[in-house]
Image: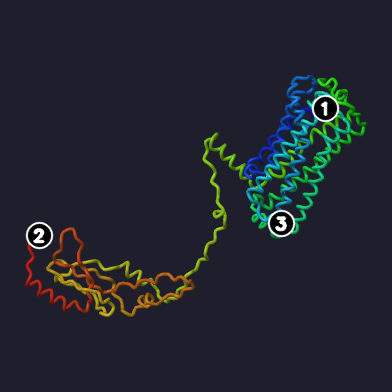
Amino acid sequence: MALSMPIGAFIAAVLVLIPLPSHWRARNVATLAIIVWLFVLNVIYCVNTIVWRKTVLNYAPVWCDITTKIIIGSSTALPACTLCICKHLELVASTRVVRLTYSDKRRRMIFEVIMCYVVPVVMMALHYIVQGHRFDIVEEIGCLPATYFSVPAVLIVWFLPFVFAVITMIYAAVAFYHFFQKRVSFATHLVNSNTSLSTNRYLRLMAMAVAEMIWGTALTTFTLIMNVVPGLLVWDNWADVHSDFDRVDMFPTVLISPSYLAQLMLVWWAIPISAYLFFLFFGFGGESVQDYRRAIDAVRCKIFRMSPRETKSAIDSLPTVRPPRHVMKTISTVDLSDDKEDFQTLPSYSPPANGGVFVTSPIKAETLSDSTSTFLDIESSPLEISFPSSSPTSSTDTALRTPPLQDDVYPVSLAQEAAPANTVFPYPAYHRPFSPSNACPVPSTQAQSQQDDVTQVDAKCEVPDMV
C-alpha cells in the first residue's frame, strides 16, 4: 500500500494534464480549474506519501502549513467547479439566450473565476476559525488539516460543499430535460448559440460534472459522518479553541485503529480516483487524440530527427470511384491474315528505267482528295513508293469503311482510311541540299499524260552541274 500511493498520485497528476490543451482553447474556466485543483492535490499527495513514508517526524512545517490550507480549499473548489459547469450547460441547452454575446461570455468567466478560486481562498481563511492547532501528521499519508469539530466547523467546512452539490443536481436535471426536448436539433442549437461546445463535448461535460458531484458528495457525507458521530466539541470562545495553537499532532499507524485507518485511506484515494474519472471522460475525445498525434510528431521531428508522418485529408480518405470499363464491340467478317502476309512480302524498291514515273496498277481518281497536287519530275532518278495492289472493292476497304458498333456514350476515333494502294510519288530532278524531297501522290490514271509533259520539260530545261 505504501508504494502504490505515491505511484497512483503521480500517474493521476500526469493524466489530468493531458486534456489541458483542448480545454485551454475552449476557454472553459471551470474545467481548467478542475484540472488545476486535481493536479495540485495529486502532487501534494505524492510528495507527502514519499516524505512521510514510515515516519511521522515534522520535516517540513512550512510545506504542511501551505498544503493543509490547499486541501481545505479543494473541498469547496471542486463542488464549485461542477456547479459552474452544470450552470453553463443548462444555459446553453435552454432557449432563454438565443446567442451568447461577448459580454455574456465575459460575465460567465468572471463568475467562474470567483466561484472556482476566490471562494475557496475565502474558505481557507475561514478555516482558521475552527483550526484547533497547526496540523496533523499521519504515517504513510503525511500532513492533514486540523479541525476543531464543532457546529461552526460543520457550517464552514462541510455545509457549503453540500449546498453546491444540491444546486449542481438541480442544474444537471434541468439541462438533461432541455437536451431530451431538443435532441433532434440539438447540434444546430449549439452552433446557433455561438458556443465552442459540440454535442459530444456537451454530453461528456455533463457526465463528468454529475459523476464528480456524486463522488464528491458521497465522500463529503462519509467524512462528515465519520467526524460527527463520535460527538461534536463545544466552541465556547476563541482563546479556548486556539490555545496551544503551534502544536503538531503525530499519529503512527500502530496507534490508529484499522477501521479508522481504512477510512483515512478511502478519503485519501478519493482525489486520485477523481483525476482518473476526469481523464476517462476527456482523455479519449477527438481533440485530445489530435493533440496526442501532434505531440508524437513533435517528438519524432525534434528529438529523433525523423520526418513527420503524412496526414491524410478528408478528401484523401474518401473511397475512390472508378468509372466502369466499356468494351468496344465491332462486327467485321474480314480476314486480315492475307493482308498481313502481303505487307510482310512487299516488293523491293527499284528505280524506273526511263527516269519518269513508275505505275504499278490503276487507281480511281475520285479516291483522292481535291487538294492533291502533282509534281513534275525533272531529269533525275525518281523516288518510287509502291504499295501492294488490291482490288478497289476488297474486303479490307469494306471493313475500314464500316463504322463500329459502340456501347459507350463517348465513342472512340474511327479508324483512318488506308492510303490508296496504287500511288505514284515522282521525284524531282533537283532540290536544295539538306532539304527533304518534294514528293506528292499522283493518280496512276494521269501518269501517262504527266510523263508526256515531263518529256517536253526535259527538252527545254538545262540543269547546271552541282558542285
Quarter occupied by the N terminus: top right
In front: 466, or 188?
Answer: 188
Which one is earlier in the sequence, the residue at label 3 or at label 1?
3
Left or right: residue 448 compared with residue 58? left
Determine the secondary structure under disc 3.
Answer: loop
Left or right for 147, reference 369: right
- Residue behind mark 1: 131
Measure how far apart labels 3 and 2 are at the Cα level.
Answer: 103 Å
Say what amino acid the circle numbered 3 marks: Thr
Q: Are marks 3 and 2 in contact (CB under 8 Å)?
A: no
Residue hosting label 3: 95
Q: Amino acid at mark 1?
A: Gln
Q: Residues within 10 Å of mark 1 (few under 14, many from 20)?
A: some
The type of residue carrying mark 2 is: Met
Circle 2: element type: loop
- Residue at x-position 86% and y-position 37%: 222
Q: Give 46 or 151, whichever is nearer the viewer.
A: 151
Tag 2 residue: 466
